[in-house]
Image (cartoon, helix red, strand yellow):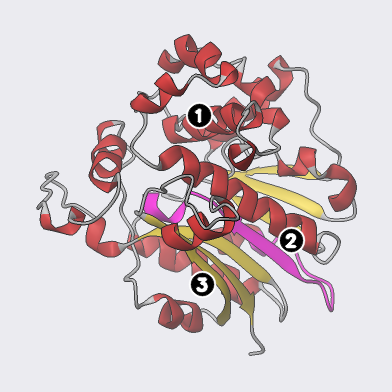
Amino acid sequence: MPKRAKSGVSATAELTCLLRAKSYGEKRPHLKSDDYVAVILSQTFHSLFSMMQKTFLLGDDIFNLATPAGIYPYIVARTLYIDDIFKKTAGRFSKIFILGAGFDSRAIRFHYALQHSAIIEIDSPAMQQHKIEKLSEAHISPPANLVFLPIDFNQQNLADTLDTLPLAAGEKCLFLLEGLLMYLEPAQVKRLLSAISDYSRDGSQIIFDFVYDHLLVDDHGSTDSSPFNGEYGVKESVEGVRTIGEAWRFGIAANGLDALLQQYGFALLDRADARELEKRFFTDKQGKCLEQINTASCLVYANREKS
């Protein structure tokens, strides 16, 4: 796993971008995604992973040894899953909030389809400034409907920011929290979801992924081997994110998702764990699974119900 390139800049965000760049250049059709922006941005990275850029872009599988087992296909499947929702719902939402945006490129890649929506990217000040600098370095101009809003989730409440962005009658929003919740403290997650719930109108939607709560480790890094029994690539993932100072802090019980969504006024539309993602994206016509996905995470798509 990579080390932090500079204070406040997420190493996992950089790794995700690099993996998307690798996917764009894939010769294996089932692993190919459409993030051409990631290819351009990755060429501007100068962290410890910069020495591996050519490996990414040439699609050399030797690089996969540097990531936990099953992470690369998970990132690919997650990208395809979310891209599909953006394509299917384009034009439905007046505002699209991308929280913990990292190097997300959907405002650029889907600009034509989303041109009538306001795209609001929310991230830590240092990470967001880093992204803006990289876009400039890569000569990529953000679209006019993309707004950058820096928020320190440790110090600021999302609700205060949303209060400055009033909704007109009938407006619906889409909230994307990709690779975010697991890095926040439970109290921060509660404030975040409460703010989204209070702001959202009926028909608004949310997409997020989470890790299972039994995979969390204590502050001393104690990792009883039992939570990882039968899990694919999870122990490596837990140890990897902790090593780079981005340890997982929040998880959801496997049977606790419906109750959590209900608490904040949302109803489940779709849930896709590792096995489901393998079935949808990596199983051929003969029923053979072509890729095994890291089992730490699950994707969720939900709708705001009537109050």
Q: Residues within 10 Å of mark 1 (few under 14, many from 20)?
A: many
Q: Quadrant of residue 298?
A: bottom left
What residue is drawn where x is 84% and y is 78%? 169
Q: Secondary structure at mark 1?
A: helix
Q: For residue 304, which quarter of the picture?
A: bottom right
Foreground mark, 1 or 3, reads 1
Q: Which residue is label 2 attached to?
A: 165
Residue 282: give x, y in percent of width and height.
Answer: 54, 50
Tag in front: 2 or 3: 3
Residue that mark 3 sits on: 194
Please name the residue shown 34% across and 56% down the image. Answer: 185
Q: Amino acid at mark 2?
A: Leu
Residues rendered magenta in the picture: 162-183
Does 110 sit above or below residue 2? Answer: below
The answer to whether 66 appears left or right of 57 in the picture is left
Q: Position of residue 24 (x, y in %)?
A: 65, 30
Where does residue 34 sit, x and y in percent of width and height?
Answer: 71, 37
Q: Which residue is mark 1?
A: 14
